[in-house]
């Protein structure tokens, strides 16, 4: 009996179901049910449900472009406002192309074509993609650790993605196609709050410029996909690669320091999502400003947390620790204005162990022209700096925007890399087991979407902390921990997804780890960072 037959037999409504989860495994609706156990529906309301939908939508887009532009290379990369970015390297997609792709995708979804799953041998798949002229897939599959895997056929085209697929194209009929002049298109998913309509495209030009910078770095470094990086390791060129990658980071930080100095900014607000590397970025920016003759003071916004007992309790009995209401905003504003006026203030010190401020703070003052660097997740929220002279504020948004793919059609999500960073850091420095970090991650992500990402375009400067060599390094620390998570764990599914991604990366050799400098962003997560040491 298939999953769909089980759902129909149960009499339970299965509206919106894209797949089901049984224990730590995702089953497609057409898969046979081979053992007893609860089948939990996966819809657009679930992370894995949205990933399933996106895989189906990517297939539909690729099929439409194969029909309209046969032989043209298509690359699917990073997330953009409301969807994912798609381009055709070497060819600019016009507004007319965009409209033709949308219309062809509509025809494909209206025809409700099946995604037919078949098990292929690795050799057969490699031969197929060689004939199709897709060397990126050939090279990736040559590194695949298993001899068989699932391929999907739809409309005469064969493809593979890393995870469950919906049954047919009719299941992904809600989408949008937004033309991005000079770049490509945004393939828009259903709206999070209104899944019957595509999400509205959110134009974030500053965010996109950071991706442009990262694309330029990829070109300099000669790395686009996972096999490119594996080849460097095999050819014993990782040391040189690390040096150039770190030099690009240093150059970007120096440029931010130059902008701050040229504009005479005094209040430097540094914000970003979890595991983006805010702390090390702040420390390195302080060093870059010292090179220019400044003596910056560093403040953590965390020290302005309100006492835990002062925070409101949510209806479910929990306390929201992510919102800006957790910060004593009036006190922060007062302190900034007084510091700018040359006064001495007592910066509070917050203890996470007790959930309260300590009895005594740190007396702090600023000399004329001296900048203060303030790091915290709410740094770009306008509420935080209301009333502080805008001409003295410089806002920096820090994020880890991964630009390396597995292959042209299978991207690596930035959020997955940040999760790996956090798993490694929490285990290294907080003795937190990976399952505990995985349990917290959905709440962290929800807070980011509410309190961080909506304000990123307020930034005067953006810094991408992603390092093109970091996945082979993170694999050294995370791979064994993730593989040890048992199938009965509620976090096995996420752990297994991360393991499958890491399978395509060669672990960084021990002998090159001394090449990762002590001020590297990566040291914040794997250890050996000296930014806070004298």
Image (cartoon, rainbow, N blue to C red):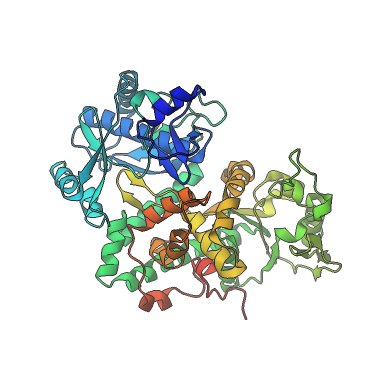
Along the horizontal axis of the image, is 471 left or right of 306?
Answer: left
> Can residue 471 be seen at all in this image of the molecule?
yes
Quarter-wise, where is residue 96 in the image?
Answer: top left
Along the horizontal axis of the image, is 31 left or right of 79?
Answer: left
Which residue is found at the position 30% from the left and 30% from the top? 115
**Which of the pair 70/158 is nearer the observer?**
158
> Can residue 222 be seen at all in this image of the molecule?
no
**Which of the pair 2/376 is nearer the observer?**
2
Quarter-wise, where is residue 102 in the image?
Answer: top left
Residue 373: image location, x then y, percent: 66, 62
Q: Quadrant of the N terminus?
A: top left
Residue 254: image location, x then y, percent: 51, 65
Residue 314: image location, x then y, percent: 76, 41
355 above or below 519?
above
**Which of the pair 474/408 is nearer the observer?**
474
**Which of the pair 467/197 is nearer the observer?**
197
Along the horizontal axis of the image, is 230 left or right of 481?
Answer: left
Which residue is found at the position 76% from the left and 38% from the top? 315
269 above or below 451?
below
Going by the picture, which residue comes out furthest to the right? 359
Which residue is found at the position 75% from the left and 50% from the top? 326
Q: Quadrant of the C terminus?
A: bottom right
Residue 57: image location, x then y, percent: 37, 32
Going by the picture, which residue comes out furthest to the front? 36
């Amino acid at each position: 009996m298939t999953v769909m037959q089980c759902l129909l037999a149960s009499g339970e409504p299965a509206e919106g179901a894209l797949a089901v989860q049984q224990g730590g495994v995702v089953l497609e609706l057409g898969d046979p049910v081979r053992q007893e156990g609860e089948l939990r529906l996966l819809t657009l309301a679930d992370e894995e449900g949205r990933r399933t939908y996106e895989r189906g939508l990517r297939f539909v887009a690729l099929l439409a472009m194969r029909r309209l532009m046969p032989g043209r290379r298509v690359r699917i990369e990073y997330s953009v406002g409301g969807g994912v970015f798609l381009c055709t390297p070497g060819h600019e997609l016009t507004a007319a192309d965009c409209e033709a792709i949308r219309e062809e995708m509509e025809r494909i979804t209206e025809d409700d074509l099946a995604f037919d799953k078949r098990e292929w041998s690795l050799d057969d798949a490699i031969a197929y993609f060689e004939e199709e002229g897709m060397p990126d897939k050939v090279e990736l599959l040559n590194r695949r650790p298993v001899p068989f895997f699932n391929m999907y056929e739809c409309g005469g085209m064969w493809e593979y993605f890393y995870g469950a697929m919906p049954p047919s194209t009719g299941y992904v009929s809600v989408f949008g196609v937004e033309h991005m002049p000079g770049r490509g298109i945004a393939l828009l998913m259903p709206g999070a709050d209104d899944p019957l309509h595509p999400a509205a495209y959110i134009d974030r030009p500053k965010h996109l410029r950071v991706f442009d910078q990262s694309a330029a770095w990829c070109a300099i470094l000669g790395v686009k996909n996972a096999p490119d990086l594996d080849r460097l390791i095999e050819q014993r060129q990782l040391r040189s690669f690390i040096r150039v990658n770190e030099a690009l980071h240093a150059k970007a930080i120096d440029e931010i320091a130059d902008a701050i100095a040229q504009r005479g900014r005094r209040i430097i607000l540094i914000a970003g999502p979890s595991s983006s590397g805010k702390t090390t970025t702040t420390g390195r920016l302080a060093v870059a400003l010292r090179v220019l003759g400044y003596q910056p003071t560093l403040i953590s916004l965390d020290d302005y947390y309100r006492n835990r007992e002062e925070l409101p309790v949510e209806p479910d009995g929990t306390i929201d620790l992510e919102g800006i209401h957790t910060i004593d905003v009036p006190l922060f504003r007062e302190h900034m204005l007084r510091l700018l006026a040359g006064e001495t203030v007592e910066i509070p010190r917050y203890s996470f162990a007790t959930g309260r401020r300590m009895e005594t703070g740190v007396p702090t003052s600023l000399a004329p022209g001296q900048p203060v660097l303030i790091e915290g997740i709410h740094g770009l929220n306008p509420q935080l700096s209301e009333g502080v002279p805008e001409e003295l504020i410089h806002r920096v948004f820090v994020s880890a925007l991964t630009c390396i793919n597995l292959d042209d059609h299978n991207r690596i999500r930035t959020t997955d890399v940040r999760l790996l960073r956090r798993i490694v850091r929490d285990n290294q420095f907080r003795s937190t087991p990976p399952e505990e970090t995985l349990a917290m991650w959905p709440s962290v992500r929800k807070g980011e979407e509410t309190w961080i990402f909506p304000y990123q375009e307020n930034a005067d400067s953006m810094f991408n902390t992603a390092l093109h060599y970091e996945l082979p390094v993170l694999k050294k620390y995370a791979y064994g921990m993730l593989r040890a998570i048992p199938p009965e764990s509620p976090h096995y599914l996420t752990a297994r997804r991360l393991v499958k991604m890491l399978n395509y990366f060669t672990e960084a050799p021990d002998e090159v780890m001394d090449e990762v400098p002590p001020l590297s962003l990566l040291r914040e997560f794997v250890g050996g960072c000296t930014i806070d040491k004298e």
